[in-house]
């Protein structure tokens, strides 16, 4: 009897915790100001830092004080930065230069720049081989860079436009969404070749990607207003839930088993993972255009980039960004 009840009790406790954690609500706004667009946000929990791409630089925030503590400059067309805290290194993707910038995380100075494929966009650090990957949108490829030396190790043809990535160190794989192909690829980190290609139907045109390492689950934010959950070992789509319009990023919190999808329509869908099931527990209202996000697993706070915009002109979807209005929205479950 005890053996039968234990899994059920665990499931009930997990579901209770998920519901107890809602609703996520706005804790504060961190005003950054300045001009230019934005893309990826990256948290370094141990260092209590948040890295935010903004225009031609990366803004660094101290999360203990919620203030700007530095900048990484000379990164034209920057999309974001992947960090390797154990090596004191980061790699920023400079889309306008077709380069990856290797950064000293202590000084925030660029050590060197490396040629990548055309329009490096997404990026990730793979700790197993201690390598950075840049995912090159126009180049339809991945550039693998040694995190210590900044030298190119390999170039991997992907056969589609890559977006967000996730790493499974134990399995020796890096996953990436091919947005225009509605495919998920699994890259072997030792051979630097594509090991698997999986369709993501009923999902289409996936952008965001998050990973539950313990339970081997991938969460994909899809352009047809859907978040799909995929088994990272078989590539099978296990479940899906509806989300908002204009999804860009996804995050996952292993402590609460909550998956997040941030959308440009001003919503974040929060869903609870339970085995092969996925259930929406909250639709968090944010701000229009706040489509990129990340989570700090230490505090469970989520961070979204946003700004104010003028009223759009006739025939335009969005107006001009109001100068100096760029900010970070901080949401959490604590008061």
Image (cartoon, helix red, strand yellow):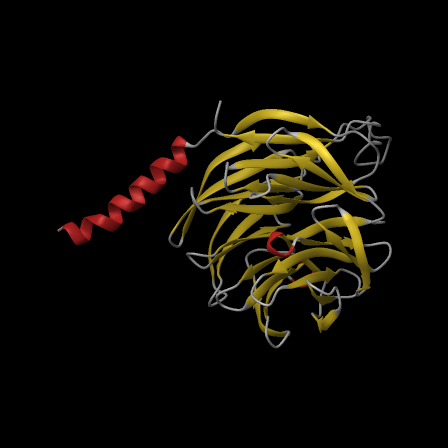
1 sits left or right of 55 in the view? left
Residue farthest to the bottom?
Answer: 191
Q: Which residue is at 63% across, 57% downward?
A: 87
- Where does residue 11 sit, x and y in percent of width and height? 31, 45
Q: Residue at x 39, y 31 (%)?
A: 20
Q: Toward the viewer: 319 or 215?
A: 215
> Residue at point 48% right, 65% down?
170
Q: Position of residue 82 (x, y in %)?
A: 67, 53
Q: To which quarter of the image does residue 152 belong?
A: bottom right
Q: Where residue 263 sits in the image (x, y, percent)?
A: 64, 40
Q: Nearer the viewer, residue 101 or 210?
A: 101
Q: Is any atom of residue 119 visible in this view?
A: no
Q: Is residue 39 above or below residue 290?
A: below
Q: What residue do we see at 53% from left, 69% from top?
A: 172
Q: Looking at this rendering, what residue extends furthest in the left direction? A: 1
Left/right placement of residue 7 relative to residue 222 reads left
Give residue 3's position: percent from left, percent from top. 18, 53
- Furthest toward the top, the residue is 335
> Front-most of 84 and 213?
84
Residue 270 seen in the figure: yes
Tell me which corner region of the image, top left, top right, bottom left or bottom right, holds residue 134. Answer: bottom right
Q: Is residue 173 above or below residue 25?
A: below
Count of labels in the image? 0
């Amino acid at each position: 009897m005890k053996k039968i009840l234990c899994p059920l009790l665990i499931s009930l406790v997990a579901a209770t915790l998920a519901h107890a954690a809602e609703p996520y609500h706005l804790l504060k706004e961190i005003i950054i100001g300045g001009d230019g667009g934005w893309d990826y946000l990256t948290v370094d929990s141990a260092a209590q830092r948040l890295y935010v791409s903004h225009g031609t630089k990366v803004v660094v925030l101290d999360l203990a004080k919620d203030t700007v503590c530095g900048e990484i400059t000379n990164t034209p067309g920057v999309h974001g930065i992947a960090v390797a805290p154990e090596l004191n290194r980061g790699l920023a993707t400079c889309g306008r230069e077709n380069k990856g910038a290797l950064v000293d995380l202590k000084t925030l100075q660029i050590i060197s720049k490396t040629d990548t494929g055309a329009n490096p966009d997404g990026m990730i650090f793979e700790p197993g081989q201690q390598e950075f990957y840049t995912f090159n949108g126009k180049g339809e490829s991945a550039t693998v860079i040694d995190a210590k030396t900044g030298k190119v190790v390999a170039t991997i043809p992907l056969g589609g436009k890559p977006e967000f990535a996730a790493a499974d160190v134990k399995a020796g794989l890096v996953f990436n969404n091919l947005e225009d192909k509605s495919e998920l690829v699994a890259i072997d980190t030792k051979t630097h070749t594509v090991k698997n290609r999986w369709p993501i139907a009923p999902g289409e045109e996936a952008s965001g990607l998050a990973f539950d390492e313990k339970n081997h689950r991938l969460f994909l934010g899809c352009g047809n207003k859907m978040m799909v959950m995929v088994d990272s070992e078989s590539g099978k789509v296990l479940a899906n839930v509806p989300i908002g319009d204009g999804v860009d990023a996804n995050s996952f919190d292993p402590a609460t088993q909550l998956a997040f999808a941030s959308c440009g329509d001003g919503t974040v869908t929060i869903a609870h993972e339970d085995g092969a099931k996925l259930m929406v527990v909250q639709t968090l209202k944010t701000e229009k255009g706040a489509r990129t996000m990340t989570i700090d697993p230490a505090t469970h706070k989520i961070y979204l980039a946003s700004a104010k915009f003028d009223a759009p002109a006739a025939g335009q979807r969005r107006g001009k960004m109001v100068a100096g209005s760029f900010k970070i929205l901080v949401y959490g479950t604590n008061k």
